[in-house]
Amino acid sequence: MTPISTTGRTRGLRRLAWILAAGAALLAAGAQATNYSLWINGRTGGGQVGNHADFSYWGPATTAAGVNKKSVNWDGYNNIATTNIHTRNALDCYCTGTNWCYVAAHSAGNLQIGYALALYGTSTRTRKNATPDASGQCGAAVGGGTQTGWNIKWVSVAGGAAGGSELANSGDWALSEPLVSDLKTSTARAMYNHNSTTGKMFYLFAGASGTLYSFVLPGQDDEAIAYHSSGGISGSGGASYCNPSDWLCNDLTLGTAAAQGGRAKWTNHSVKFRDDSEQKNHYTKGNWGGIVGVMRADMVTNAQ
């Protein structure tokens, strides 16, 4: 047997040390990877902007709502274009580097995440450390670096207003609110390319309690948003869509299939819950209520 030289033994030890160090670094990176559940509020706001622990819009902060839940608070009053920075800051904080996110949105929060993905979803993002300051901004992650877009597993939306609401069209909401102009059906549908989700799936939860404003909202509605919007129906304007039990208008189909009558849903939009019992309204009532309650239960089960 040929003896191993001292030089060869040293090289072997160095190689072994390098392999062990690389393995330890990979394990450390894996150990630091975290999943988060981001909750994006709708109109009227409710939580302190920048405070990702304030769930006053939704209900008790102690209520389970998905892994490591964070509240992406924005004022729910001003235009999407001027307030979307708060959504992007939160996405940078928790959905970059080794971290991944599940996103839950309500009402105009649908416009927030849709706008962010369509306009900024392929932009260069700095990897952040998931430790926000008082304004909701995070510092650079250890090791720094950049990436394209955000690490998002999927998006859930309850009572989504991506297609706008006829209540904004008719002046039923205060016209002094800048956001109300965004919520007009023609404006909301033209605000960004709703088919551009950077491949992220949008799972939709559509309420149908109706009654209060049913004379304004076409088809089935949750008292604020009609099925054409909460069901992700494409096109430049809203139309009447209903539950299968209603023979007066076309059905809102489950999944990604086109609605009855042939109108397609936006790309990567899938109706996960349709309120066939017509019991779920639009409002959280400070206790994770209405159609949000259905989405919350789904987040508890699947956002892990």
Image (spheres, helix red, strand yellow):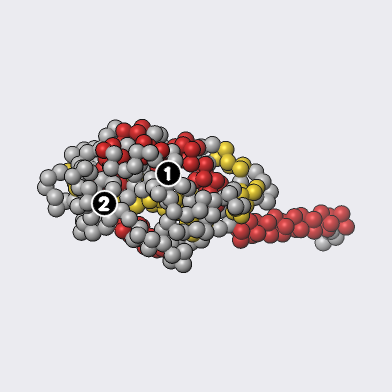
Tag 2, which secondary structure?
A: loop
Question: Which residue lies most toward the left here?
Answer: 247
Seen in the image, is 102 located left or right of residue 96? left
User: Horizontal and vertical percent for residue 123?
Assistant: 54, 36
The quadrant of the image that shows the N terminus is bottom right
Q: Can residue 153 be seen in this view?
A: no
Q: What residue type is labelled 2?
A: Asp
Q: Residue furthest bottom?
A: 62
Residue 240 versus residue 4: which sits nearer the camera?
240
Give how far across and how far down residue 215 sits, in percent: 18, 45
Which residue: 54% across, 51% down?
50
Numbered label attached to residue 222: 2
Q: Position of residue 214 (x, y in %)?
A: 20, 47
216 vs 10, nearest the viewer: 216
Q: Which amino acid does label 1 sit on?
A: Tyr
Q: In this view, does 55 lie above or below 196?
A: below
C-alpha span from label 1 to label 2? 21 Å
Residue in the picture at 38% in, 51% down: 106
